[in-house]
Image: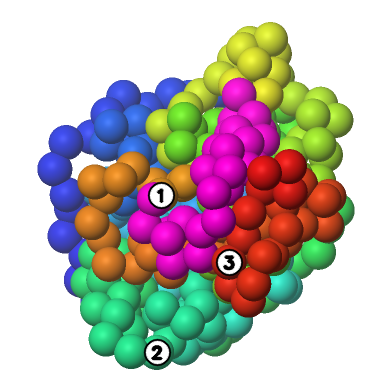
């Protein structure tokens, strides 16, 4: 598959043998920020995004290894530029690399059934140049990729996907956050293979990983101050509690899940992408499950909920 370069390229940043390839609008979706690591013996690229596609002439074949924080469409857009590279992802996400059907399974029902399925497949293949890699290899938490003079260490941080991982480049101390992306949108756990509880545990784990520079795949980009990173991570995590509180407040009067989806607790009310209803429902139901378990919300009749104090 021939990939054409896209338009404008933002300014990249280099830290020794590590270059952050900054995507358009600082990696705002559908774009993203990728990382190229040059060791003495090998070169590795993390999450080849549309930023890599934009540099096709320069980067085609320029990596011996492709290392993925997780398997989602925007993180694999430049995969076909590295046909001879060894490809690695967490073993829990491998199915999404090995076939398009597997990736649709990770997304969930909206990508597997009904009228949205064909549109989702077309979007993944046409916008993000999906190409299956049956040869992809799985890694586990704690895996280390030695490039000669530097290495990349894996920290499993599930929640966004089952296999989502943070990747630490040593000795530079650069931690690639993947889609723990510190955006104002907040954590995303809307796919079939996403999990709110796992995401919260991963956010806590991230606080304990020593690093000097943090790179998010979307928008927050490069963070070089530890205090700034801590503040951004706290604000990002706080979106989960804010969603809890918004749902409880809305349920002062009884509402069905369909009514809650229409109200929007995750996306803006004016957002019109068709699959957003399915994603919104997946995220809301995870909040409801734990709010019911906490006794803050009660199911007053099948599929209809109310604040327990109401």
Of residues 38 and 297, the one nearer the viewer is 297
Q: Are marks 1 and 2 in contact (CB under 8 Å)?
A: no
Main structural element of the magenta stretch: helix, strand or loop? helix
**Residue 127 part of the magenta-drawn span:** no
Name the residue rendered at 27%, 50% in the picture.
Answer: 271
Q: Quadrant of the C terminus?
A: top right
Residue 210's spot in the image, x, y percent?
81, 26
Residue 264: which disc?
1
> Above or below — where is 99 with respect to 189?
below
- Tell whether 172 sits left or right of 246: right
Mark 1 lies on a secondary structure that is: loop
Disc 3: which residue: 304
Camera-near label (2 vs 3) is: 3
Of residues 305 and 83, the one nearer the viewer is 305
The alpha-carbon separation of the residues under discs 1 and 2 comes to: 23 Å
Mark 2 lies on a secondary structure that is: loop
Name the residue rendered at 69%, 65% in the picture.
Answer: 299
> Above or below — where is 274 with respect to 254?
below
Name the residue rendered at 24%, 78% in the picture.
Answer: 119
């Amino acid at each position: 598959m021939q990939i054409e370069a896209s338009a404008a390229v933002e300014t990249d940043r280099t830290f020794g043998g590590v270059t952050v390839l900054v995507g358009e609008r600082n990696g705002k979706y559908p774009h993203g920020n990728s990382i190229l690591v040059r060791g003495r013996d090998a070169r590795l690229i993390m999450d080849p995004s549309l930023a890599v596609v934009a540099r096709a002439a320069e980067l085609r074949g320029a990596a011996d290894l492709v290392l993925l924080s997780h398997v989602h469409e925007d993180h694999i857009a430049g995969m076909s530029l590295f046909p001879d590279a060894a490809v690695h992802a967490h073993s829990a996400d491998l199915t999404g690399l090995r076939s398009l059907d597997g990736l649709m399974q990770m997304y969930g029902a909206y990508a597997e059934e009904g009228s949205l399925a064909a549109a989702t497949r077309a979007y993944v293949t046409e916008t993000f140049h999906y190409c299956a890699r049956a040869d992809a290899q799985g890694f586990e938490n704690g895996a280390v990729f030695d490039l000669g003079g530097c290495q990349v260490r894996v920290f499993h941080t599930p929640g966004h996907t089952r296999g989502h991982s943070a990747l630490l480049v040593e000795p530079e101390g650069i931690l690639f956050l993947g889609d723990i992306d510190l955006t104002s949108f907040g954590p995303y756990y809307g796919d079939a293979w996403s999990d709110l509880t796992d995401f919260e545990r991963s956010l806590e784990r991230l606080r304990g990983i020593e690093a000097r520079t943090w790179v998010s795949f979307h928008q927050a980009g490069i963070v070089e101050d530890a205090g700034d990173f801590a503040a951004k991570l706290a604000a990002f995590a706080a979106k989960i509690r804010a969603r809890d509180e918004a749902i409880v407040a809305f349920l002062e009067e009884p509402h069905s899940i369909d009514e809650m989806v229409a109200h929007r607790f995750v996306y803006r009310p004016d957002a019109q992408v068709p699959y957003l209803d399915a994603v919104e429902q997946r995220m809301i139901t995870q909040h409801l499950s734990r709010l019911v378990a906490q006794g803050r919300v009660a199911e007053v009749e099948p599929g209809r909920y109310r604040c327990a104090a109401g």
